[in-house]
Amino acid sequence: MTYPNEAELLAKVPGQLFIGGEWIDGADEPFAVNDPSTGKALKHIANANPEQGIQALDAAVAAQEDFARMAPRERGEILRRAFDILQERRDEMALIMTLEMGKPLAEAQGEVTYGGEFLRWFSEEAVRVHGRYGTQPEGTGRMIVSKHPVGPAFLITPWNFPLAMATRKIAPAIAAGCTSVVKPASLTPLTTLYFVKILEEAGLPKGVVNVITTRSTAAVSSPIIADPRLRKISFTGSTGVGQGLMKEATKNVLRTSMELGGNAPFVVFEDADLDKAVEGVIAAKFRNIGQACTAANRILVHTDVADEFARRVTQKVASFKIGRGTEEGVIIGPLVEDKAVDKVASLVDSAVAAGAELLHGGKRVEGDGSFYEPTVLNRTPASSEIFREEIFGPVLSITTFSDEEEAIRLANDTEYGLVSYVFTEDLKRGQRLIDRIETGMMGLNIGVLSNAAAPFGGVKMSGIGREGGFEGIEEYLYTKYTLTPNPYA
Ligand code: NAD
């Protein structure tokens, strides 16, 4: 694969706000977007102030009525064209993600595929928004149930999957006929800015999607959320920030979709196929350098197989190449910033102090960039902090259990419920676990399950709502019931 020259590519990424179909400068001092593998600035971009946030909402409000009336097929075709353009630019998009976020290029390519599929899926869903018509049970009036775009939406995305988290919201909003203001994470805004250029080329009308980048996140976001013209907020990020946004959303009783944190259990029973389980845990843990809400966080392994499982996993992890995501064969790129390295280091140190056995890694990598060694811990006590907290780094921590009841109790011993992984060759046990683990998603004998055609989302403090699948578009629609009199009366 030949990637474009980095400097030339970065020069092509817009560094401005996108409001009402125009690229405009930010009112505040531009801010730097850094390469986490070097700590150096890649580009300086527009820094919106609160008035510009409201200007973006003005544009979304102005475009809403016409966009809601646009033929669903036309909206679908815009998404489909955006999908095609994204495929043509896949190397460019992958490189932008690797530069600003750090993930290895092979994974960034995977995200272009995954993120792009939301465009294709919702291009197909745009024409499948149905209602129903029926006679009242008494045989009198006729009931019409119809679906309508909920209205201007505020879409806030995190840094860890800069493309997919954006397309997973923007595509269903467009398909449903909603306009939006999009606020990408300030660590990784370049991907969204480049993607919006693609939407523009695909023929998206002015004002339908508006993008604001800012360092004054709360000051810019709060007035938008408080504005009675906004009808919906969809957020992906940490549970703490999501809770704050939910409080703000109560003022105007906004429709909310919340994709929040996780603390996924990865349960390996004594009857599991260990080769499959090892392969599964490597994918579920080290994808995105461990910085995924779906990352396996607590590896629960039956005592009979724990040491063998740990040995095989450690052997694999020891072979991982660490480096800048652009280098051939790199598995472990940098974490997104130094603060993330500090957090991971502190979790590992406290786990070891609590009695976990360090089998591999356990240190930050000295030198430039925000690197932490891929790490394996065995026999981590369930009482340790690392068992409670989302690690968000390349640390695989194993805790043992001795029977199915204990495995279920440990798996559910968290306030989160996004995703769970279960490895067993016993079909009945697998079915029991589907029933009893409190989770929005489950991988049964598989370590990666996200797909545009499936409903992604959690229970408990992992969130509200679903993205993708048939469910994804519903988040942007409201249901209206109309009654007309009996035509024969
Ligand atoms: P974060 O909560 O710090 O930030 C997410 C977004 O919210 C960013 O755009 C940020 O600028 C913005 N934000 C922060 N404070 C805000 C405020 N007061 N008002 C408005 N916006 C605000 O999360 P992060 O560090 O970017 O992402 C990591 C977190 O996201 C992890 O907890 C991870 O589990 C979660 N996540 C969840 C999913 C999911 O689908 N459930 C997917 C990816 C990431």
Image: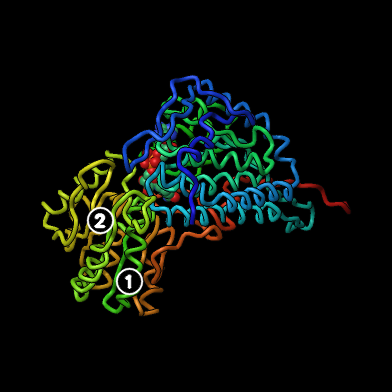
The residue under the point 14% across, 58% down is: 356
Three-letter residue code for mark 2: Pro
Callout 1 secondary element: helix
Q: Nearer the viewer, mark 1 or mark 2?
A: 2
CB-based contact (under 8 Å), mark 1 and mark 2: no
The residue under the point 37% across, 56% down is: 328
The residue under the point 72% across, 48% down is: 72
Give x and y (percent) for residue 425: 36, 79
Task: From this view, report whether residue 427 is shown above or below residue 421.
Answer: below
Q: Which mark is residue 374?
A: 2
The residue under the point 73% across, 47% down is: 74
Q: Position of 334 compared to 80: left or right?
A: left
Find disc 1 in the rendering and name its residue: 277
Give x and y (percent) for residue 184: 47, 37
- Residue 377 versus residue 417: which sits nearer the camera? 377
Task: From this view, report whether residue 94 is shown above or below residue 181.
Answer: below
In which of the image's four quarters is ligand 1 placed? Answer: top left
Q: Position of 353 compared to 138: left or right?
A: left
Give x and y (percent) for residue 257: 50, 44
Q: Position of 297 compared to 353: left or right?
A: right
**CA separation, marks 1 and 2?**
18 Å
